Image (cartoon, grey):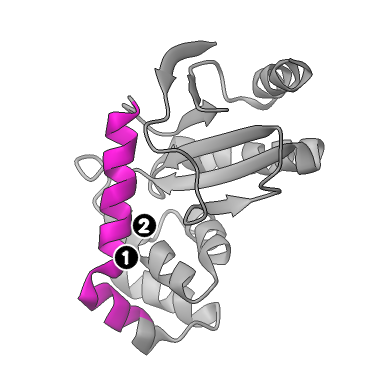
Amino acid sequence: MSSGATLAIPVGPKDHARGSADAPLTLVEYGDYQCPYCAEANPIVELLLEKFGDAVLFVFRNFPLVDVHEHAEAAAEIAEAAGLQGKFWEMHDVLFENQKDLRESALLHYAQNLGLDTSQIQNDLATGQPRGRVEADFEGAIRSGANGTPTFFVNGTRYDGSWQLEMFETYISKVLKG
C-alpha cells in the first residue's frame, strides 16, 4: 500500500491542518482544485476525519497540475489568499463544491460570498504571496515523489493504495493499531 516514497517537507505550523497536532496519524494530501479525482476524494477525507476524530491530523497542500487544469493555479492562489484572512478551509470546500467554474470572476465571487475582503484578496494576489506558497507546496510535492493528484502521505510515507472509503479506512485503521 505504501511506495516507500517519503514526505520531503515535514508537516509544520504553517500548514493548513484540520485536527489535533498531537494525533497519532497525519494524513497529507497534495491536491488540485480542478482535478475531478481530488473532488471525489474530498468527501471521503471528510468521512475519514469524522470516523477517526482526534486520531487524525489532515493537511492539504497545493499541487496544481497546470498542464492539465488551466484554472488550478488561480484556485490554489485564492485559497491561500483566503487563508491569509483565516478562511482557507472555507475556500477549500467552496472550490471543490464549485469545481466546474473556477474562472477568475467566479473565484472573486466565492471570496465575496465567504465575507472576505476582496480588495485585500486582490492586493495579496498582486503581491505574489499566495503564489509563493503554492509554488513551495508544488516543489514539496515533486520532491516527495507526487506524480498525480490526489497524492496522499500517511505518517510521512506515500500511500499508493485505493483512496476509496473502505480500503483507505482499513489502511488507516491498520496504521493506527500499529
Give the x, y percent position of residue 164.
Answer: 62, 25
Residue 152: x and y in percent read 49, 30
Prevalent SS, magenta region: helix
- Please report the residue visible at 31 percent of the width from the left and 54 percent of the height from the top: 134
Q: 42 or 88: which is nearer to us?
A: 88
At 29% from the left and 49% from the top, the residue drawn is: 136
Q: Secondary structure at mark 1?
A: helix
SS category of the residue bearing label 2: helix
> Which labelled disc corresponds to residue 117?
none
Examine the image and state in which quarter residue 169 appears: top right
Q: Say above or below: 40 vs 61.
A: above
Residue visible at 69% across and 49% down in the picture: 19
Name the residue type under label 2. Answer: Ala
Q: Quadrant of residue 8?
A: top left
**Residue bearing the label numbered 2:** 76
- Residue 36, percent across and down? 44, 40
Q: Are marks 2 and 1 in contact (CB under 8 Å)?
A: yes
- Residue beneath the point at 36% across and 57% down: 76
Kind of residue at badge 1: Pro
Question: Can residue 64 be seen from the camera position used here?
Answer: no
Q: Is residue 79 visible to us here?
A: yes
Quadrant holding the N terminus: top right
For label 1, the residue is 130
Query: Which segment is the magenta one?
Result: 121-144
Is 70 on the left-hand or right-hand side of 92? left
- Relative height, residue 97 to residue 160 (above, below): below
Task: Specify whether residue 132 is painted magenta.
Answer: yes
Of badges 2 and 1, the one in the foreground is 1
Residue 69, relative to residue 24: is it above or below? below
40 and 50: which is toward the camera? 50
Is residue 43 on the magenta stretch? no
